[in-house]
Image (cartoon, helix red, strand yellow):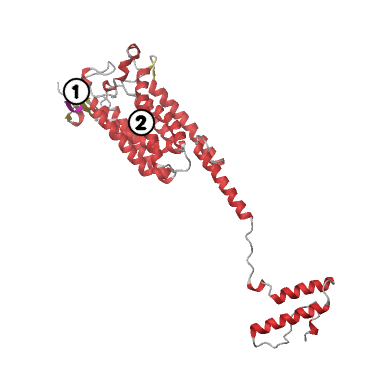
Amino acid sequence: MKDFIAFPALGLELKISDTIVQFELFGIQFSLKWYGLLIALGFLLAVIYAMRRVKDFDINPDAMIDVVLVCALFAFVGARLYYVLFSEDRSSYFSNPLSILKVWEGGLAIYGGVIFAFATAIWMCRLRKVNTLAMFDIGSLGFLIGQAVGRWGNFFNQEAFGTNTSLPWGMTGSIIQQGYSLKYDTDLPVHPTFLYESLWCALGFLLLHLFSKKAYKFKGQIFALYIIWYGAGRFVIEGLRTDSLMLGAALRVSQVVAGMSVLGGIAFYFYLRAKHNSLPVDLFETAATDGETAETEIAGGETEDAGGTEPEEIPLAADVETPADSGASADGESSANGEVPEAAAKDAADTESEETTEHTGDAPENETAQNPDSGAAENE
């Protein structure tokens, strides 16, 4: 049977496979899958978007790239471990641990990736001195892009679909008709829940992108809205799926996590808003922020110290004492104190008059020297 995917009510059938190309190199078989390609494409688009918006969130581009690359690695590990821990076949994974590494056989859970990515971001942001909440904000927008694109990998794999439906967009396919699960009728179309989630994430990205441009008020705001938005949509969509990871016999793991995300996101949002309205948000502030603040305070103190010392006042020309003023003042003070005899004052006045005449050339020889306390009338 050839691989195909069909939408019977729409009269649409696609001859399509989950593999793009297969080849052999050095005796080893390689294949390029649509699933892997679309995940890589979603990641690339998310990084490109983040790089274009990085300055809007006051993040250093180089530091952001370092954080993103490490978080992407741990997100992949987290998505796999989450699936293994809650899989119905987890006993087989534990009995043969090497099988956990066979990711090409399927088995990644987005919630595990999200949890590990954000947990790793806290550590990396402190290491690279990036504000954690700002990184969470831009990372949330990137996640929505990656999820919207990556979910189409489920389309090509014919997985992550829902129960039977009579809606016009109900789908079927070669793998679906093989009886992937006993929870649906293989002869009837099923909900394309991968498409629902892709559209939900695309709409969430559009709304939060516009919000970040027009109404972004405090760090962590976009992140809180993201976990509320995605959690609410995932809670509803997960109820339609037939391949849910279960917690016991009745609880779907993703619905439990989604419900907790919505409640936690609402509480976190109002906490951040209250902090913003009273004091600047300092949650998850990095050591770099503290260091920069300390340096700013030190620099400010030095500036104040420098400003506190008044510069030496440069006297104006009108304020500069001339020899006449200096001599008169000195003679006046001496006379007032009774320390210089009157004859000495007269000699000083005569000498000053001669110097003035030499400089001006036109002034009379007996020009009066202004010496208020030294008997200037004798010069006249």
**Most common secondary structure along the magenta stretch:** strand
Residue 292, how many percent across, how many down?
Answer: 52, 42
- Dividing the picture into quadrants, the one containing residue 168 is top left
**Farthest residue, direction left:** 1
Question: What is the magenta range?
Answer: 18-27
Q: Is 214 in front, or is 85? A: 85
Q: Report the residue marked by disc 1.
A: 29
Residue at 41% x, 39% y: name it: 63
- Count of all numbered marks drawn on residues in the image: 2
Q: Is residue 20 magenta?
A: yes
| Quarter of the N terminus within the rendering | top left
Q: Amino acid at mark 2?
A: Ala
The CA span between labels 2 and 1 is: 26 Å
Looking at the image, residue 61 sits to the left or right of residue 294; the answer is left
Residue 229 falls in image quadrant: top left
Element type where label 1 sits in the image: strand
Query: Disc 2 vs disc 1: which is toward the camera?
Result: 1
**Nearer to me, 351 or 105:** 351
Q: Position of residue 271 (x, y in %)?
A: 52, 34
Q: What quarter of the picture does the C terminus occupy?
A: bottom right
